Amino acid sequence: MNIDNLVQNITPELFERLQYGAATGKWPDGTPLSDEQKQQTVQLVMLYQAKVAQSNEQFTIGANGEMVQKTKAQLQKEFNSDNEIARFSEHDL
């Protein structure tokens, strides 16, 4: 299996486990990752983010393998979308 097929077959649940392992150095059940597993887990997370995930996070890995950093204006524009439920001013409260 080539790397593209491997990444395309990662489920969202598996991706969450990989992210957890990369962030904490442990699997969700508490088992520590070896140094080799840590390196491979981080690589898989980065590949998945670059090739599959459509993330709205500030820092991600782009399809070209480089880090993508959104500006403050881009983040504000995303957060000021039609997803607002209500907006209050201090006089309304």
Image: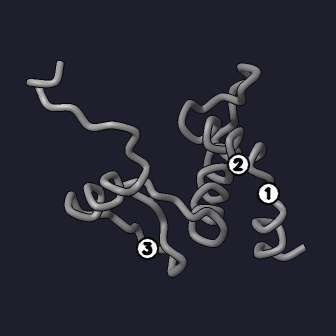
Can you say whether 2 is above or below 16 in the image? below
Can you say whether 1 is above or below 15 in the image? below
Q: Which residue corresponds to the image point at 67% horizontal and 53% vertical from the top-left?
A: 40
Residue closest to the far bottom: 64
What kind of residue is marked 1?
Ile
What kind of residue is marked 2?
Phe
Q: Which mark is residue 66?
A: 3
Q: Which residue corresponds to the image point at 63% horizontal and 66% vertical from the top-left?
A: 47
Tell me the CA gap for discs 2 and 3.
Answer: 19 Å
Name the residue that disc number 2 marks.
15
Q: Is residue 61 left or right of residue 26?
A: left
Q: Which residue corresponds to the image point at 11% horizontal and 25% vertical from the top-left?
A: 90
Q: Is residue 48 left or right of residue 82?
A: right
Q: Residues within 10 Å of mark 1 (few under 14, many from 20)?
A: some
Which of the two labelled residues, at mark 2 and mark 3, occupies the earlier sequence position?
A: 2
What kind of residue is marked 3?
Glu
Estimate the x, y position of residue 19 in percent, counting from the top left.
61, 43
Look at the numbered discs 2 and 1 and tell me whether their residues touch, using CB distance below 8 Å: yes
Look at the numbered discs 2 and 3 and tell me whether their residues touch, using CB distance below 8 Å: no
Tell me the CA gap for discs 3 and 1.
Answer: 21 Å
Q: Residues within 10 Å of mark 3 (few under 14, many from 20)?
A: few
Residue at disc 1, secondary structure: loop
Q: Nearer the viewer, residue 89 or 50?
A: 89
